[in-house]
Image (cartoon, rainbow, N blue to C red):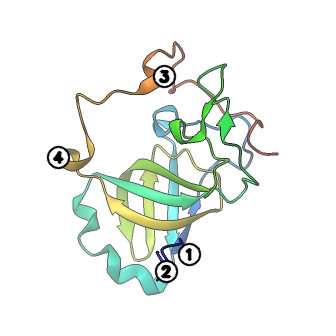
Amino acid sequence: MQSSEGTLDSFTYTPIGIVRSPYTDIAGMPIQPTGAEGVRGTIVLRPEFSPGLNDLDEFSHIILIYAFHRSKGYSLQVTPFLDTVQHGVFATRAPKRPNTIGLSIVRLINIRENILTIENVDLLDGTPLLDIKPYVPAFDAFCSAKAGWLDRSSRDAGSARSDKRFSE
């Protein structure tokens, strides 16, 4: 948000729910949903937000926007999990960011009241959820998109696992 003086103000967000997953330790968990294929978890949405789930069950996938709640501080130059050289943090998906916001696209299995069952979960148990958006292939998939340095990466995000490099 911009103030009348043209400077940026800070924001405060209140989580709409919490993500439950089998991952209780940062080290060894998948770094992207492709590495968590078939792994199930749940979203426990705060009950007052349940009406916002109307019609979401028509979508196969959803975008989760969340807080990297265990990330402290940030670095503008980081060595990401899929490379051995440093890159600018904004050219990575590293969790140590000026604003510790992450996103994942997961498969929506079902919704029962305020509980969503999801699959391909790459999030730490207890992750605060900030928002849910439907994944729309016509809007969100770009076949001609370039992936920068990741186009040259020889490692597979599906098999890569996190370590503790971003937890300190």
Mark 4, residue position: 138
- Secondary structure beneath dot 3 equals helix
Which residue is the extreme one toward the right? 168
Q: Which mark is residue 140?
A: none
* Viewer-side label of 1, 3: 1
Is 32 placed left or right of 51 in the picture? right
Mark 1 to mark 3 CA distance (whole Å): 33 Å
On-image quarter of the C terminus: top right
Q: Position of residue 12 (x, y in %)?
A: 58, 77
Mark 2, residue position: 3
Mark 3, residue position: 149
Q: Position of residue 82 (x, y in %)?
A: 59, 24
* Viewer-side label of 3, 4: 3
Residue type, label 2: Ser
Q: Is residue 27 above or below residue 9?
A: above
Residue 102 or residue 159, whichever sits in front: 102
Q: Residues within 10 Å of mark 1 (few under 14, many from 20)?
A: few
Mark 3 to mark 4 CA distance (whole Å): 25 Å
Mark 4 and mark 1 lie on one chain; the one further toward the N terminus is 1
Mark 4 and mark 2 lie on one chain; the one further toward the N terminus is 2
Mark 1, residue position: 9
- Secondary structure beneath dot 2 equals loop
The structure residue drawn at horizontal position 25% and vertical position 40%, both measured from the top left corner, is 141
Q: Residues within 10 Å of mark 2 (few under 14, many from 20)?
A: few
Mark 3 and mark 4 lie on one chain; the one further toward the N terminus is 4
Quadrant in which residue 59 is drawn: bottom left
Q: Residues within 10 Å of mark 4 (few under 14, many from 20)?
A: few
- Secondary structure beneath dot 4 equals helix
Mark 2 and mark 1 lie on one chain; the one further toward the N terminus is 2
Q: Is residue 132 above or below residue 61?
A: below
Instruction: Kindly indicate whether the residue at mark 1 contacts the one at mark 2 (C-beta within 8 angstroms).
Output: yes
Residue type, label 3: Trp
